[in-house]
Image (spheres, rainbow, N blue to C red):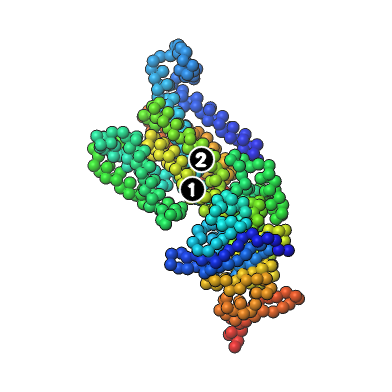
Amino acid sequence: MAGKTLMSVHELSFAYGRRTILHEISLNLRGGRLRGLLGPNGSGKTTLFKCCLGFLKVARGQIELEGRSIAEYSPRELAARVAYVPQEHRPAFPYTVREMVEMGRTPHRGAIPALSKADHRAVDQALARLNLTALANENYNHLSGGQRQLVLVARALAQEAALLFLDEPTSSLDFSNQLIVWEAVQSIAREGLGAIICCHDPNHILWFCDEAAAIKDGRILAEGPAREIITRGLLEELYDRPIQTADLNGRSFIYPLTSPREANDA
Amino acid sequence: MTYKRKLITAALLLTLLIILVFPALTAGQYDIEAGKVFGLIWGKISGGETAGISRAQEVIVWRIRLPRLILALTAGLSLAVSGAAYQGCFRNPLVEPYILGVSAGAACGAALAIVYPHIFPQGQLTAFLFALAAVTITYGLARSRGETSSVALVLSGIIVGALFGAVVGIMKYLAADAQLREITFWMMGGLYYATWDDARLTVLCVAPAFIFLWWYGWHLNVLSLGDEEARSLGLNPAFCRFMIIIAATFAAAVCVSTCGVIAWVGLMMPHAARMIFGPDNRWVVPVSALLGGIFLLICDTIARTLAPAEIPLGIVASIVGAPYLLWLLRSKGRDIYGR
């Protein structure tokens, strides 16, 4: 079920100095939908994220959140509506899992340094939702990469934002942890949140996302339901190499047409 | 550590601090009984009679030891707290309060005032102004295209430090023997000349900075995750960092200009606080303050009493501090930083 439109990007262009990174991007992000963003390195995905999250000031085009331009929101107001899930990393200080998730309450805190009951409840729920309750008092830096990524997702839930931006959450994870993170994000989107996720594996987008957008050289090449737009033609255009798709047991797969070994054999 | 245990530990530290006040006031070249000391202080505060206490004892306790005690506590507090603030701000546990050139600027100002007293009659004020000037230059150099990155700040801090250090070098070269001696002593740090005016001024300047930084403890936590995350969690990182740097620099500059350069406190105390209480800056800031006060009080009492002539405080702090940091690095380094 698609919810209402949360964020709409309209003809957004962005340049660092003379180098134009984004060309007239238009995109709608809706609640209850998981959208994958696919594109080669340097295609402008990160810049698009930074514009949508208010890290970069938009010079041309419009980004609207709930009908209002995001430039009119204060960082605090924006954070109460839009959450950012960065790629997992180790902070310089050894915060516990609980402390990391508590930081998600920043936009909802009052003036007092202590957290309120509502804050603690939201943190407890977020931890429970991602099965992290048992790890709450562990050192965040000592967890596995996959667990750390889940903690960051939990932090976004504690933030109670309607829209989540996930920046390559699975890039540094092993096979199983990638699937765990994807399943968590997918089930969160099923509950009505909107999410957009940057990812380098087209298979994952095909398997887990409702919608997809492909971006290359700062332009949107295709946009729509993931199963419809992720085609052989699109991927070959995106990555400039022959690619094959196949169906197996009702699932679609993408694989390179020539592996190095086949090339040697030929 | 639970909230309750943190509170109890903090209360214990506060008790320790209060206990340490006794030897600090009674011990010295001129031992005075505790009863007399507190009778005198009570008499001074309540405005009553101070019977049975000689004039010399009154001068020693009221004019020398008490302001010195207050100054030691304030200096320890402010250096430790600004260290904690800088470490959170720059996401680097090895940063200290002098990182942006406060000490180099203050040393330069002090050296100028010592060598050219007719141009800079107010030594302390000159040191303070030069300390602020150094940090302002650091900040100005680091700012490019309306942004100030942490790396740029640290690098320009090193540059400015080197520049002001060179001026100190020139002053040392030009100085007469007595002046050279004075510069050297100033740079080793000490509380020899502490007066009530110094104590009052530092407390008045440091107190608001401390309260502000404690209040900003949560912001420090969020800032220590990096600018983009802080921004996505609803803070304006550049503004927060600016405010925190102003408060921390101000507190450090006031103390350096009064007490000279005292190393280690700002680096070690936040570490110790983190080891006991965890990295949450809502605790690290006040606990660093307590530990900084305790540490400098111990060091200053040692500096006053160990040898017939006074040992510079900065040297005592380094001798006590270096083994501690080494131990920390060898035993707990992996634990606390999770690498």
Q: Residue furthest front?
A: A67
How far is the residue under mark 2 from the one under mark 1?
Answer: 14 Å
A72 to A206, vertically: above or below: above
Determine whether, in the image, residue B41 is placed left or right of residue B183: right
Q: Quadrant of the C terminus of chain B?
A: bottom right
Q: Residue at x 66, y 45 (%)?
A: A119
Same chain letter for marks 2 and 1: yes
Q: Residue at x 59, y 52 (%)?
A: A79
Determine whether, in the image, residue B106 is placed left or right of residue A4: left
Secondary structure of residue under mark 2: helix
Q: Position of residue A255 (x, y in %)?
A: 64, 77
Q: Position of residue A187 (x, y in %)?
A: 72, 61
B317 to B235, vertically: above or below: above
Specify the amino acid type for callout 2. Leu
Tell me the residue that label 1 is attached to. Answer: B239
Q: Is residue B85 visible?
A: yes
Q: Do residues under tags 2 and 1 come within 8 Å of each other at their CB atoms? A: no
Secondary structure of residue under mark 1: helix
Q: Residue at x 57, y 41 (%)?
A: B282
Tell me the residue that label 2 is attached to. Answer: B213
